[in-house]
Image: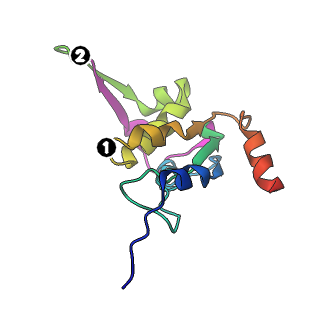
Amino acid sequence: MTKTFLPSVKETESSRQWHHLDASGKTLGRLATQAAVLLMGKHKKTFTPHMDCGDFVVVTNVGQIKVTGDKANQKVYFTHSGYAKGGKEIPFKRQFEKDPTVVLELAVKRMLDENKLRAPRMKRLKLFAGAEHAFAGQFAQKKAK
């Protein structure tokens, strides 16, 4: 008989790795999918759907993401305050010029399941509009091992 392997919480916490993704020239949806898979931990042998076994993801050059087709002109982000007539629509172009990290953050967030694990997974996503980031030491430690 084969037994189902369930990793312990300590084991998943200690085995978290750091991944660096360079967004320059990549498509928004494909990059968001790649980041979501790493955050969930689906790339690991020990993936368990009800446990948070994903890794840290650092994405740089988010300001250089591209979108296909006419999405730059047609895509709209909708928010609502909860009050009557409280809806707001922000075009993709304006949001991308204002803060490009929000665009990728929303894309990744909406690819994750809407449950208790989404908030801790999103905390492990680090986005930077330029090439500079504060987590260079994590990758240096990984190479030294």
Residue ID for mark 2: 86
Q: Is residue 125 above or below residue 39?
A: above
Instruction: Identify the residue at the far bottom of this view.
Output: 1
* Percent coordinates x, y for residue 118 in the rendering: 39, 42
Residue range highlighted in magenta: 63-81
How busy is the neighbourhood of tag 1: few (under 14 within 10 Å), some, or many (20 plus)? few
Q: Residue at x 71, y 38 (%)?
A: 135
Q: Give, as a three-letter code, the residue at label 2.
A: Gly
Distance between the Cα atoms at labels 1 and 2? 24 Å
- Residue 114 is tagged as 1
Q: Compared with residue 37, is residue 119 higher up or lower down, i.e. above or below?
A: above
At x 39%, y 76%, the residue is: 3
Image quarter where the C terminus lies is bottom right
Residue type at the position of mark 1: Glu
Q: Nearer the viewer, mark 1 or mark 2?
A: 1
Q: Picture quarter containing residue 2?
A: bottom left
Relative side of 76 to 93, left or right: left
Pinpoint residue 98: horizontal percent, then vertical percent: 53, 23
* Whole-percent x, y for residue 80 in the image: 26, 22
Answer with left or right where residue 98 lies relative to residue 20: left
